Amino acid sequence: MLKNLLSCVREYKRPTILTFIFIIGEVIIECLIPFITANLVNQMKLAIEMKVLLITGLSLLLMAMVSLACGGVAAVTCAKAATGFAKNLRREIFTKVQAFSFENIDTFSTSSLVTRLTTDINNVQMSYMMVIRTAVRSPLMLMFSIIMAYIMGGALALTFVVIVPVLFIGLITIARKAMPALRRVFKKYDKLNEAIEENIRGMRVVKGFAREEYEKKKIFKAANDIRVDFTRADRIIAFNTPIMQFCISFNVIFVLVVGSTMIINSRGASLDVGQMSAMLTYGMQTLMSLMMLSFIYVILTISLESMKRINEVLIAEPSMKNPENPVMDVKDGSIEFQDVNFKYSENSHAYALSDVNLKIESGMTVGIIGGTGSSKSSLVQLIPRLYDVTEGAVRVGGVDVRQYDIASLRDQVAMVLQKNQLFSGTIKENLRWGNENATDEELIEACKLAQAHDFVSSFPEGYDTYIEQGGTNVSGGQKQRLCIARALLKKPKILILDDSTSAVDTKTDSFIRQGFKEFIPETTKIIIAQRISSIQDADMIIVLDNGHVVAVGTHSELMASSDIYREINQQQTQGGDFDE
């Protein structure tokens, strides 16, 4: 796990190493200053010359400035290394997620991946910063302070025999007690993010059903669960302060009482005032170092959970991979389903699709219709290999889709979904997702075919109109038509429309289909629809029911042979509603 994570340091090794070097310099100087100061105090009792006093004072000032400079440079290099490490880690995770199949995404869940890319990486970044700076500084300061204390105070340094174990055991016990609550927080962050994401995406539905209060209670409950665990952890961690104060007070009292006694009894022979003042300083440095080590322990323990969650993503293997020698060229848009069975998970008991056998010639217009849950979308998602078949084979251009280079295959298959996605940016930028090199004339032509040009032209900024995130500033029908235009610019060999004209009227729908015939006659067009009028002119209509192909034929053939198709047609022609 650490090897996977530390591989993301890469170009930030130099600032990491520089941080170590400057921290060591800072610690050494900070430990020498009390030693020199103590000697100066002892010499002042002997009435040293002003020249010696000034030289020593200037030396101390210079050392303090160098120590400050080392600390400042270490802070800069540490920040650069930690933020750079986090940047690389985010890039690695995001790149890995982009390679995931839908099956991988379903395994982790969207909200969990968002948490790992944000909260978890922030925790790891903080941990890395602590390790390369504080986790180096504190042990060194602890070791040097104890050594210098023995050099300066001799037997007086026995105070550390008492306070160091007490403080160390106390702080570690507190940290361990707090860990279970802190670990639970991460899973609850996933649930909170999921609830927030769901609420924002479904804001129109929430407001339409006046369910704001219900959603507030749900979010507040998730947030309160996190608060409870954090409060429980903070209540335990709060004992750090009294334990620390006890050890500091004990150290001060011990050094003052025992040190004063030694000075008086030996008249400065075994211990002097300067040495006792240095002991107080070294004692404080030792205790603060232990305090920081306990804090590092807490941070690292919290981050360990984040590290595990991040590593799960890094080591996850995409369920879909390119073959060793992939086919790069898709010959045509012909499609064949041969004995296809499909289920979304190996643990699923039921198949989403069963015994599917279909043959579609290149350039055909194919309609797909069926009731809710008949697996229409599941069928078409196998074509661009968004999912792999469980059994059987899907062939495009005469080649099993599993033999293609995934990017090459998907580049020749354009999908327009009912709830397709527009991204923040101008209309031009969104359209050029289909063809980044498309000219303005090509954009206009595609929009005319998709019946989008008129409403785009009505905007004050035209094709430079800015689309808000998710396309919230355009209607559902406008969004669908822009997505269709985007797909047309791709000029694919296969075009799949998954109920993507549901938000437009029948007249506009007819114009769009006519545009397909004229603009992309050689492209295989697969149209999932809930209106028979959208597919009745298709070369082939496929009727699905509960994951099975129950009928295939033209409109007239199905009217004569398929009870399901006739029933759908009757419901729609008589004004009834058919629920897709």
Image (spheres, helix red, strand yellow):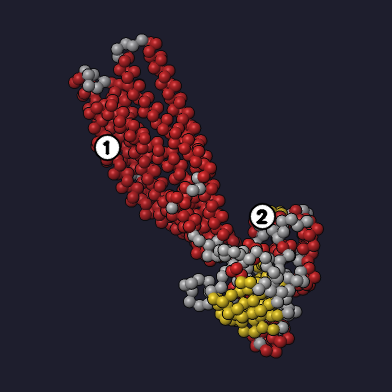
Q: Nearer the viewer, residue 349 or 520?
A: 520
> Residue at position x 28%, y 32% from top?
251
The local secondary structure at tag 1 comes to: helix
Label 2: few (<14), some or many (≥20) within 10 Å? Answer: some
Per the rendering, the mark at residue 163 is: 1
Q: Earlier in the sequence, mark 1 or mark 2?
A: 1
> How many numbered tags mark residues here?
2
- Residue under circle 2? 424
Disc 1, disc 2: CB below 8 Å? no
Depicted 263 relative to depicted 397: above or below: above
Per the rendering, the mark at residue 104 is: none
Q: Position of residue 369 (x, y in %)?
A: 66, 78
> Residue at position x 44%, y 21% from top?
62
> Residue at position x 57%, y 65% from top?
323
- Image quarter hosting the C terminus: bottom right
In the displayed orientation, state which residue is furthest to the front.
Answer: 325
The local secondary structure at tag 2 comes to: loop
Depicted 526 relative to depicted 297: above or below: below
Amino acid under label 2? Ser
Amino acid under label 1? Ile
Q: Position of residue 410 (x, y in %)?
A: 64, 65
Q: Nearer the viewer, residue 40 or 209?
A: 40
Depicted 94 relative to depicted 260: above or below: below
Report the Cα–Cα distance between label 1 and label 2: 59 Å
Q: Is residue 393 left or right of residue 566?
A: left
Q: Position of residue 116 (x, y in %)?
A: 50, 54
In the displayed orientation, state which residue is furthest to the left.
Answer: 265
Q: Is residue 470 left or right of residue 286?
A: right
